Image: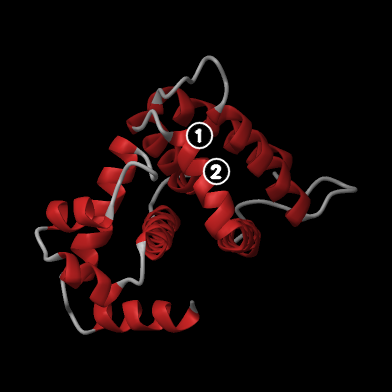
Amino acid sequence: MKKVWKKNAGARQSGSAKPHAIVLAGLQLFTQYGYRKTSIEDIARAAQVAKRTVYLHFENKAEVFLAILAYLGDQVRQRCAVAERATGTAVDRLTGLLDAYFGMGLELSSKSEHMPELEETFSKLARSRIGDLNTEYQVRLARFFRSLRKTGAIGGPPQGLTVEQIVEILMRGAQGAKHDAKVQGDRQALQQHLRKLATLAIAAMKK
């Protein structure tokens, strides 16, 4: 498994567009038709490559699926970096950071009626990798709070709480917002909810 991931990474680094095209095609088809109903032949056709080309870069359909997770993780990191560099208030930037992660999840779920199946597939094939991505994101949020404190934009967390606990509360609140009946796939409604969470977190850490 690890060997395959290294091979895929090397292909991307060499500038080959084919693995990327295969990943994007897989994402589109899995979203539109679900994991079980999508075949390697379907992915090859959508990516406009030969079936053997798909197998040159990926051992099987599961490897394409895992590559999609890696691609989505990279997209989240890029969005987070943009939010961190943005001008604006601490609330603006924190809202952007929350939206970078949870907004993408809402985008995917709103585009597909097969999300229960896809989530089940993610759980079976990549539970630990999803956990790693969550942990990485939590560390990023904690680092953001500490950078704000270092510049004097905020103080420390309320007595009895740590920065990590503030992050955990934020994560739980943002995750719950995606399933709120008032959101129901509405990206603007989610952003408003995330902004309220960001406002509360920043207010709690004001000097």
Q: How is the image coloured?
A: secondary structure
Q: Which mark is residue 127?
A: none
Real-space CA distance between mark 2 and mark 1, rounded to the nearest whole angstrom: 6 Å
User: Mark 2: few, some, or many residues within 10 Å (few <14, many ≥20)?
Assistant: few
Element type where label 2 sits in the image: helix
- Give the residue at the far right of this rendering: 160
Does the image show residue 207? no
Q: Tell me: residue 50, above or below residue 194.
A: below
Name the residue located 19 percent from the left edge and 61 percent from the top edge: 21
Left or right? Give the position of 46 relative to 71. Answer: left
User: Mark 1: few, some, or many residues within 10 Å (few <14, many ≥20)?
Assistant: few
Q: Tell me: residue 128, above or below residue 167.
A: below
- Give the residue at the far top of this rendering: 182
Asked if the residue at tag 1 contacts the one at tag 2, i.e. Cβ–Cβ closer than 8 Å, the answer is yes
Left or right? Give the position of 5 relative to 123. Answer: left
Given the image, on which type of amino acid does mark 2 rest? Glu
Name the residue located 38 percent from the left edge and 51 percent from the top edge: 87
Q: Tell me: residue 80, above or below residue 196.
A: below
Residue 151, x across and y down, in percent: 59, 62
Residue 67, x across and y down, in percent: 38, 64
Name the residue located 33 percent from the left edge and 32 percent from the top edge: 111
Given the image, on which type of amino acid does mark 1 rest? Pro
Element type where label 1 sits in the image: helix
Q: Which mark is residue 120?
A: 2
Q: Nearer the viewer, residue 62 or 85?
A: 62
Residue 184, x across and y down, in percent: 47, 20
Residue position marked by numbered label 1 in the rendering: 116
Residue 84, x across and y down, in percent: 45, 57
Name the residue located 57 percent from the left edge and 21 percent from the top edge: 180
